[in-house]
Amino acid sequence: MSDQHDSSPAGSSALAGSAKVVAAIAILLVAALAILVVLDAISLAVFGDFSKKILLTASIVILASVAIGLLSRIGKS
């Protein structure tokens, strides 16, 4: 087997990994809310409110992670 090295910096893989984790958590939370709607534990209006908040929060965390990753790369140059 031959060893092949990635041409991408180590910081970008960690950044992509953290973005995937945040996105996975957001998807699981929205899925849990959808299950509660199906079981009539919460109303559809509450589901809409909570899912918007979850997706907006996940977007903010992912964008903040990208910004921190870019700033850390600039500092190393």
Image: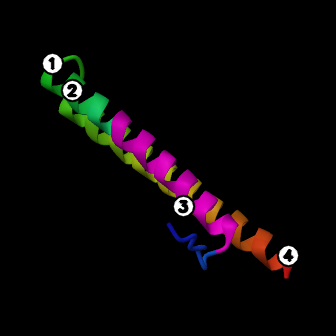
Q: In the image, which is nearer the foreground, mark 3 or mark 1?
A: 3
- Secondary structure of the residue carrying tag 4 is helix
Q: Is residue 37 above or below residue 67?
A: above
Q: Position of residue 33 (x, y in %)?
A: 29, 30
**How dense is the environment of label 1, judged by Cα within 10 Å: few (below 14), some, or many (20 and up)?**
few
Residue 50, above or below 58: above
At 67% from the left edge and 73% from the top edge, which residue is drawn?
A: 9
Q: Position of residue 26 (x, y in %)?
A: 41, 43
Distance between the alpha carbons at the discs numbered 3 and 4: 19 Å
Residue 20, x across and y down, in percent: 47, 53
Asked whether the beta carbons under mark 4 and mark 1 sit within 8 Å of each other, the answer is no
Q: Amino acid at mark 3?
A: Ala
Q: Are marks 3 and 2 in contact (CB under 8 Å)?
A: no
Which label sits on residue 76?
4
Q: CA distance from mark 4 to mark 1?
A: 52 Å
Q: Are marks 2 and 1 in contact (CB under 8 Å)?
A: yes
Residue 52 vs residue 23, the one in the foreground:
23
The CA span between labels 3 and 2 is 28 Å
Amino acid beneath label 4: Lys
Residue at the disc numbered 2: 35
N-terminal of the pair, mark 4 or mark 2, is: 2
Dots 3 and 1: beta carbons under 8 Å? no
Q: Decide whether the magenta segment is chiefly helix, strand or loop.
A: helix
Where is residue 13, by image quadrant?
Answer: bottom right
Residue 58 sits inside the magenta stretch: no
Residue drawn at x 32%, y 38% as measured from the top left: 30
| Mark number, residue 39 | 1
- Label placed on residue 16: 3
The residue range painted magenta reads 9-29
Name which residue type carries label 2: Ile
